[in-house]
Amino acid sequence: MSRKDTQRQVDAIRSRSSELENHLIDEYRSGYISRREFVRRGGVIGMSIPVVGFLAAACGTGSNTSTSSGGSADTAVKAGGKEVAVKPGGTLKLGMSPGPTTEIDPILVADEGGLSVMSQSGEFLSWSDSKLQLQPRLAESWKPNSDGSEWTFKIRQGVKFHDGTPMTAEDVASSINALSDPKSGSNALSTFAGVLSKDSAKATDASTVVFSLDSPNGNFPYMLSSDNYNSVIVPKDLSGKWEKTFPGTGPWKLEKYTPNSGVSFVPNKDYWDKTRVPKLDRQQVKFYPKEQAQILGLQSGDVDVLVHFSPTGGKALLNDPNVTVIELRASVHREIHMRNDKKPFDDKRVRQAMGLVVDRAALVNGLMAGKADFGNDSPFAPVFPSTDKSVAQRKQDLEKAKALMQQAGVSNASVTIDTWDGFEMPDLAQLLQNDAAKIGLKLTPNVTPATTYYGDAVFGKSPWLDSTMGITDYGHRGVPNVFLAAQLSSKGVWNAAHFKNPTYDGLFKDYVSALDLGAQRAAAAKIQNLLLDETPNLYTYFYYFLTGTKKNVGNVEVSAMGHYDITKAGFTSAA
Amino acid sequence: MTRFILKRIGLGLITLWLLSVLVFFLANVLPGNVARRVLGPFASPEAVAQLNHQLGTDKPLITQYLNQMKGYLSGDMGTSVSTKQPISDVLWPALGHSAKLALLAFIIVVPLSIFGGVVAALHEGSTRDRIITVGGLSATAVPDFVWAVVLLIVFSLGLGIFPSTAAWPDGSGPLTQIKYLLLPAFCLVFVLFGYIARMARAGTIESLDADYTRTAVIKGLPQRTVLWRHVLRNSLLPTIAVIATQVGYLMGGLVVIELIFNYQGIGQMIFRAATQKDFPALEAAVLVVGVVFLVSTLIADVLYSILNPRVRLGSADQ
């Protein structure tokens, strides 16, 4: 195709495209965003994949790397490699620790084990892949209106639930409405807060669902993707427990589920996407109550894949020649809060000093065995495309920290740092204690069981939300919105720092309503700088999501949320 | 004899009742609330209140306790608050699993340790005696989970002879099940061997020194007869008591072993119920372990009294 023809075709596409889409094309053309980012954002705002692909080639500079102001959206640090040839058939055994800890109910599920298992038979409107790109699944396409306050999803036709009943737009609307209904006690309420209210999803015809949002939101499709793991599409007339038959439209059908022990699935031969009908005969998942047992399970060959293991618990696997480790960037973090309204942290210089005294390099390379990204004291993890990476990274600076403490007139203060006895948090508390001692701040770790630390999880009845200083574990999210709203906004329900800053609240609003990446990144930069100055919380690292497979297993795909996709997986000939 | 057994059962029932009260109220004074634990720290307060209401955990403790006891008496173990399954669906298979592991451990350790103890006693002060007593004691002093790790590293990761888990695949026959259970069973064997062997040794030494043994030897009975009829019958009394008290440990105290080997026994069930604040499951599991403990102690008492009438008569006199 000649250059002229290409240009003519580009013009034709642009004339048909919305303002938002044209804006994105301009951003890409001007080199402001990378090709990968263009593809990702194109997917989010509902541009079709072939069109995005064509434009990426026609309009781009050919560069696949990020520009100075941006970053690559690729989350894979060390992926499982390119797709390899696998033998059809066989049973893949997977280990999961701890597995689903409660009843698996799509509306209530809040644990990694539950969501991992649920997304084998259940499906979402779209799949947020390891590059944070949205792959259409039960939705064929989606489009926002001009300001992003209304989104229209086209639902795939001809898809059937495992019992043979057709999946319709009504099923989609009812599944999502159940999640936004405050009465359901849904786990997705925190995601939908201020975005989607009860009964805002309407099936306008057999293949269309329209979502009317509370306020414009440029990231809305993520909230209906696998990132919001509660949003699996279930039959509208589902009666009884979901966990009995795992009803869904996904590529795997339930064979047998034994709570606390394991689950097995067989391929759904009637799956709508013939390229994703599983090659394996069966997958068998074993639940391990303790991480150490699952590590041994992989090493001794009892299982072929560990869906997720932690850098601290699974150090033995990192250098094991018989194991392939898949590493994904994630936004998993430990929020270290400092009560902004209590001494000694009511003076921001003391909080800044804490940020400057922490030896982040020791935390990332020592504590996390190098399997983490540096945190810059805001929830904008490097994994998020909207994070402005040009904001300078905070590093240890003892002289400056001491000077700040002196200016604040604080010496020999002592503070209890609360946390619970999970993951690496007790070790982190101890390392912080050592660092803080260097500026005359005496931290005393108080490590309790999780139930004690979280208490009733409301202000006034929870060491987590009431303590002067504490360490809290947060799981991965595909976009930072929930962190920004709940941890930091004045009315945030998880605002343990009691940080109340009208400027921040305004910036947060700007960020959420920004539809294009440029605007998001501009708002993010302002928030990042404000948080560095105010330092309500410390965010010292974001650690990777690690998956382990035996060498003879290929094509395992995971998401940092804890979903895994083994539809293309199988055993290679290499033993 | 009947009176003796009835009295034991009566005392056992009182113990069980006290146990149920203790577990229920101790579990409920732990901080945090049930629905919060089930729904996670990030669930909304409304959802938590609603689930507490649904589970009945917002009712006064006494009402909750009485409701639970009523259920037990009518054979209903209740429903797990975390998995929403009937507790009996999990409890009985878990008990069965624990029993299998305990049985295998017993089949190995009882003859082995009694044999070891008797051999040590017969050669008191010799090298053989020292090896058995010091070796046994050292093995017992090492905690079961340390044995677990050592055995796993050597036989599972190193030599690859045994699986690293005790959870056998569905549909496995008895031989495969035994293969999966051997490593955890041997952890228990190591822990129990020293203890039981020492008891057997002490009892045997005592019996060897007893007047009746001397008489038996003097009247010219063959050594084998002296040993079987006179020595062992008397020397094993305390050993039986020790073995019986270990049943409770094996049937509910193997939390760490069951976790390391990922075995769905009752120890793991108790651990899970405790960490998830699944009180109905915790209460039911602890009570069942209590029953097992009491029954095994009762059997030991009866056996003991059959072998040693002094116990039976002494107890009846009281």
Image (cartoon, coloured by chain):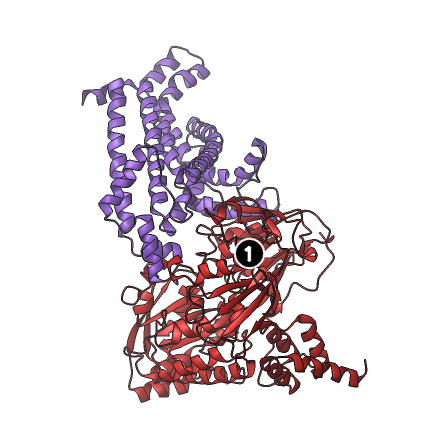
Chain colours: A red, B purple
Quadrant of res A7: bottom right
Q: Residue furthest left?
A: B318
Q: Residue furthest front?
A: A205
Q: Neighbour class for label 1 at 10 Å: few (<14), some, many (≥20)?
A: many
**Labels in figure, total:** 1
- The picture places residue A156, in percent across and down from the top left corner, at 62, 61
The chain holding disc 1 is: A
Is A129 situated left or right of B208 in this image? right
Q: Is residue A369 above or below residue B298?
A: below
Q: Is residue A200 above or below residue A145?
A: above
Q: Is residue A511 above or below residue A122?
A: below
Is A216 situated left or right of B286 in this image? right
Is A204 situated left or right of A42 in this image? left
The residue positioned 72% from the left and 50% from the top of the image is A88
Q: Is residue A306 above or below residue B2?
A: below
- Looking at the picture, tell me which residue is in the foreground, B60 or B151: B60
Q: What is the quadrant of the N terminus of chain A in the image?
A: bottom right
Task: Say what secondary structure mark 1 lies in.
Answer: helix
Asked whether residue A370 appears in the rendered view, the answer is no
Q: Residue type at mark 1? A: Ser
Quadrant of res A567: bottom right
The residue positioned 34% from the left and 22% from the top of the image is B303
Please name the residue that numbered disc 1 is placed on: A119
- The picture places residue B74, in percent across and down from the top left corner, at 32, 32
Asked whether residue B282 appears in the rendered view, the answer is yes
Is B306 situated left or right of A567 in this image? left
Q: Residue furthest right?
A: A2
- The picture places residue A354, in percent across and down from the top left corner, at 38, 79
- Looking at the picture, tell me which residue is in the foreground, A188 or A319: A188
- Looking at the picture, tell me which residue is in the foreground, A244 or B75: A244
- The picture places residue B164, in percent across and down from the top left corner, at 55, 46
